[in-house]
Amino acid sequence: MIAAVEWPALVSLVLVLLAAVVVPILWPRFAAWQRDRRQCLELARGSGLDASEARLAWRLARLATPQLPLAVFVRPSLWDVAVARTGASPASVAAIRAKLFC
């Protein structure tokens, strides 16, 4: 009877300890990802992109330069790299590039 009570408590303790270790490690990465995503969408909206184009810009930005996704807003050559790495339509990417850099 005692073993039946201790087993769930032991599992709960292990899960709490695991969360106490994993959350502080992953939280900064998640926060940086959210910050970059928010800034990318703000830049996209400020450049006149609609919602679907802004989502595509974010997806391509993460693929082109994962460590610095906002670089696609200042380096047009990164859009070519992003198209090569995804199945995105070259026409839609060309329309976004035209709005951003022309």
Image (spheres, helix red, strand yellow):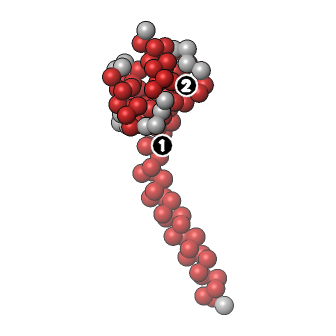
Q: Is residue 34 left or right of residue 6?
A: left
Nearest the viewer among 36 and 78 is 78
Report which quarter residue 77 is drawn in: top left
The answer, for residue 64, to whether it is visible in the render is no
Outermost residue toward the bottom in this view: 1
Q: CA distance from mark 1 to mark 2?
A: 23 Å
Q: Secondary structure at mark 2?
A: helix
- Nearer the observer: mark 1 or 2; the answer is 2
Residue 8 vertical position relative to residue 18 in the rendered view, above or below: below
Nearest the viewer among 70 and 63 is 63
Residue 4 vertical position relative to residue 56 in the rendered view, above or below: below
Nearest the viewer among 44 and 91 is 91
Q: Estimate the x, y position of residue 101 in percent, counting from the top left.
A: 42, 12
Q: Estimate the x, y position of residue 79 in percent, counting from the top left.
A: 39, 26
Q: Is residue 75 left or right of residue 23?
A: left
The disc at residue 40 is none
Report which quarter residue 90 is drawn in: top left
Residue 71 vertical position relative to residue 32 in the rendered view, above or below: above
The disc at residue 30 is 1
Q: Estimate the x, y position of residue 22 in percent, counting from the top left.
A: 45, 56
Q: Estimate the x, y position of residue 41 in percent, counting from the top left.
A: 53, 25
Q: Is residue 7 left or right of residue 32?
A: right
Type of amino acid under label 1? Phe
Outermost residue toward the top in this view: 102
Q: Residue at position x 38%, y 37% from top?
A: 85
Type of amino acid under label 2? Glu
Viewport quadrant of the N terminus: bottom right
Report which quarter residue 94 is drawn in: top left
- Residue where numbered disc 2 is placed: 53
